Amino acid sequence: MTTSVLAAPPKGQGQGRGRTKLSHDEILRYSRHLILPEVGPQGQQRLKDARVVLIGAGGLGSPAALYLAAAGVGTIGLVDFDVVEESNLQRQVIHGTGTLGQSKLDSASARIRDLNPHVHVERFETRLTSENALEILADFDVVADGTDNFPTRYLVNDACVLLGKPNAYGSIFRFEGQASVFYAKEGPCYRCLFREPPPPGLVPSCAEGGVLGVLPGIVGSIQALEVVKLILGVGETLVGRLVLFDALQLSFRELALRKDPGCPVCGNAPTITELIDYEAFCGIEAAPTYDGAEVSAPDVAREIREGAGVVLLDVREPQEWDICHIEGAMLLPLGTLPATLGALDDRAKIVTYCHKGVRSLKALEILKSAGVSNVRSLRGGIDAWSRAIDPSVPRY
């Protein structure tokens, strides 16, 4: 049985942090918890006294927030700076059509209040950075990391280690998910498993690679479950274990994790004793830059009208091409580009494009390295083309 991350209340103070005891309404609401001997009134009071912060109110944060609120976690912190977009609704179930265009914090807070008015929501409408992470996370008992990028993932890990907080971790991609609890006081941290991040661009984001809509519901619910177990001090948590979930096979695998004595943040002689520049650590700033590398959609459209001989090179995947493409473009997926350079006329005025302009810059780098000099990247990708030039091209 695990030990609760909440400090036991002082003798004679059954209310924990001075919060009010369970009301009659709460006793009725949580009655199915109260009759569980592993929870009972004392456990439900622990949930009410607990403070949990979710990093991200998106795919993983949505189910985690809903189930933690329903379970009666007294204070839920939300860290997000994004707005609700239509492409979110396939998986981010805390939001709805009626909240399109709203900040995710407004949308999520309203849904939590409707689900459980006994829950207090603390909002942090900001990007989590090295400058604010320690201050934001310090006053919470458990952190649930639902981020989708490596700089923030390492930032959350290091901040949790420095603050002594458990990190209920989850990640998703296409049809696969991972979950664990990284808690340096009792086991390994994220860096013990992944000492270094992958090279920039090697792992596509969900926006580039896609994700099955049901998947974050499963992984985010596992995160919520681990948070509840940490608060109650029951069961065996995922500290020291990594769960791998394959949605297509409906299979779970488990890997045993060990604390790395040489870990730079939680090892025997840590070298990371304060938060660092995580963009630089993950190589985000290492990509080469070229003068005039990007060109706007209106400028490309003008050059096409003027017959400037522009060759549009679509570097997305075939299934994305089937969704939409720019008329007259040529499809050469980014992964095949190095082997198919012979299909290009190196004298042509090439403009690479992808979904939103990330992969096309990588394609530009490949072409430049191969000696193709007259190449630019469409800023904002086909999404910008749809918004600025041709609305008949579907956005996705």
Image: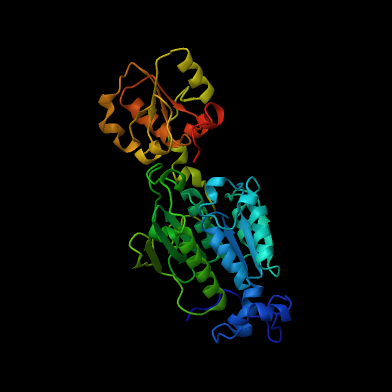
Asked whether the viewer can see residue 183, the reply is no
Residue for point 37% across, 63% down: 244
Q: Considering only vertical position in the picture, is 33 above or below 121? A: below
97 sits left or right of 120 in the view: left
Residue for point 39% across, 66% down: 243
Given residues 285 and 212, the one toward you in this image is: 212
Q: Based on the displayed image, in which of its 4 quarters is residue 239 positioned? A: bottom left
Q: Considering only vertical position in the picture, is 373 above or below 139? A: above
Instruction: State how the image is colored.
Output: rainbow
Residue for point 47% across, 60% down: 170
Given residues 126 and 298, the one toward you in this image is: 298
123 sits left or right of 5 in the view: right
Residue for point 74% across, 77% down: 20
Q: Residue furthest front?
A: 392
Asked whether the viewer can see residue 85, the reply is yes
Q: Considering only vertical position in the picture, is 231 above or below 268? A: below
Q: Based on the displayed image, in which of its 4 quarters is residue 141 positioned? A: bottom right
Residue 27, horizontal then vertical, whole percent: 68, 81
Given residues 362 and 86, the one toward you in this image is: 86
369 sits left or right of 154 in the view: left
Residue 296, horizontal then vertical, whole percent: 52, 25
Q: Considering only vertical position in the picture, is 312 above or below 167? A: above
Residue 236, horizontal then vertical, whole percent: 45, 77
Residue 366, horizontal then vertical, whole percent: 34, 30
